[in-house]
Image (spheres, rainbow, N blue to C red):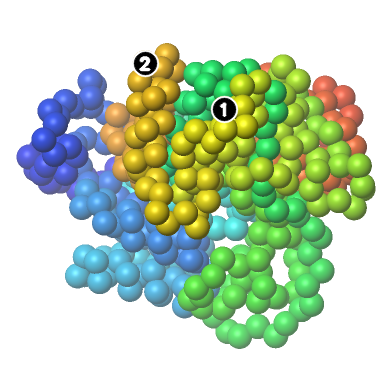
Amino acid sequence: MKSHPFSRRRFLEATAVASAPFILPSGIWSAKIKPNDKIAMGFIGMGKQNGGLQNRFMADRNVVCVAVSDCDTTRRDAALKRAHKRYQNDNCKGYNDYREVIARNDIDAVCIATPDHWHAIQTVEAVNSGKDVYCEKPLTHNIHESIEVMKVVDKKKAILQTGSMQRSSREFRVACELVRNGVIGKVKSTAVNVGPPGIPCDLPTEKMEPGLDWSMWVGPGPMRGYSSVLSPRGVHGHFPNWRNYKEYGGGMVCDWGAHMIDIVHWGLGMDDSGPIATIPAENPKAKKGAQLVYDGNIPLMHGTGMGSSFYGTDGRVECHRGRIGLWLGDKFIAGKANQSERNVNLSKELDKLESDFLKDAKVKLYRSNSHIPDFLNSMRTRKKPCTHEIIGARTSIACHLLNQTYYNHTEIKWNPKKNTFAAGGDPTWLTRNYRGDFKV
C-alpha cells in the first residue's frame, strides 16, 4: 500500500462529529490503513453510476482517485478529467483493461460499477490482490458467484461494501426496527414491488463507432453483435438497459429487487440466511406473482405493496425511498405514505415513529447515515460495513432464486445453511457458461 500521509489532526477534523466527543475506535492504530494514510482508490466501469460514485468518493479529502478503467474511450477520458480537475494534476491514470488497475499494489480499494455479469469476477480478483471493494448491487450474476465472493472475502479478511445504499437511509432502518421490535405483531407475509425477471437478449446488431472495446465489454458473457441498448457510446445520462437481459443482468428482479429484497431480509433478520423455497406464479408467462418463502412459512410476494412491505398480525409497515407508513389494524398511524404529500415532513414523521414506538426498543439495527463514509470507516477499523459481503451475496441469492422460478416455472427447495438446492433445482441454474479466461 502506498502511503498518502496527512496529519493526525486533519484526520480527527475530518472524521469527528461536530459538538460531540470523538473517540478513536480501539485498534485503529494497528489497522491495515493508518489514520495518517490517504486511501488510494481505483474505479472500474465509468458509466453513469460510477461517475456519481467517483465524485462522492473524491469529495472525501482523505481519498485520492489514482486510476479509472473503462473499455469505452470517452467514458474513461471523462472520468480522468473529473479526477484531474478535482486534484489539479494529471496523476490519475486511465486503463482500457480493469486488470491493470487491480495489478497496481499502490491501490487500497476499488469501486466496481460495471454491468452485473462482471461484478463477481472483478470483485474476486480485487480481493485476491489484497484490495478492499465497494461493488454495486446486485453483488453477483448467479448463485455460484455469491458463494465464491463470501468465501474469498472471508479468506482474505477484506472489507466489502455492497452498493445497497438503502441501508444508509433512515426510513428503511426505522421500518425494519418497527418490524423487528414487534410493533406490527408477528410477521405473516412480506412483499416487494419491483419489475419483471430478466429476458433473453435478442437485440439486433448495430454498426459500432470506433472507441469501444466490445469484446472487453462482453467479457465473460456470450459474444454477440454490438448494441447501443447494452452499451451506449460515450458519456450518457441514463442507466443502460443491459440490466433487462439475463446474459448481462437479471431484469428488475435483480436490479430493484437487490434493493427491496435486501430490506425484507433486514426486517426479518435474515441477513445470514435466506429463503427456503420458491413458489412459481400460476401463469407460466407471468412477470409477477412468484414468491420466495422464508422460515416460519413467511412468503415474500413479488409485484405488490409499496416497495418493501411487511404484514403482521397487528398491522403493517411499508417503505420506499422517501416514504414510510405504519398502520395498526386498518388505521394509519404515522409516516409519509405517498410522495405527493408535500405538506408531510418525512424527518418529523420518522422522529414521531421513533419516539412513540422505538424509544425503549430492544432491537437496534446498524446505523449508517451515509454509505460511502461507512465503507471508508470500515477500511480503517476493519469492522464489517453495513452491507458487507454476506448481506450482499445472500440478497443476490434470493434474487437469483426468484428469477430461476420464473425462468423454469417450478417450485424450488433451498437450503440456506449449505447454499444448495434441497429439492427441485438443476445444478446448471447455480452458474453460467463463462467465455474465455473470465470466470469465477
| Helix, strand or loop under label 2 | loop
Q: Would residue 45 be seen by someone viewing this image from the given angle?
A: yes
Instruction: Tell me which amino acid carries mark 1.
Output: Leu
Q: Looking at the picture, does residue 273 appear above or below residue 105?
A: above
Q: Which one is in front, 412 or 340?
A: 340
Q: Looking at the picture, does residue 11 appear above or below residue 152?
A: below
Q: Which one is in front, 2 or 352?
A: 352
Residue at 71% x, 44% y: name it.
Answer: 304
Instruction: From the image, tell me which residue sits under label 1.
Output: 328
Residue at 27% x, 46% y: name it.
Answer: 39
Percent position of residue 279, x then y: 84, 34
Image quadrant where one finds the C terminus: top right
Image quadrant where one finds the N terminus: top left
Percent position of residue 201, x then y: 79, 64
Give residue 342's quadrant in the image: bottom left
| Residue at mark 2 to residue at mark 1: CA–CA distance | 19 Å
Mark 2 Cα-neighbour bin, 10 Å: few <14, some 14–19, many ≥20: few
Instruction: Tell me which amino acid carries mark 2.
Output: Asp
Percent position of residue 18, x then y: 13, 39
Mark 1 Cα-neighbour bin, 10 Å: few <14, some 14–19, many ≥20: some
Of badges 2 and 1, the one in the foreground is 1
Residue 99 vs residue 8: left or right?
right
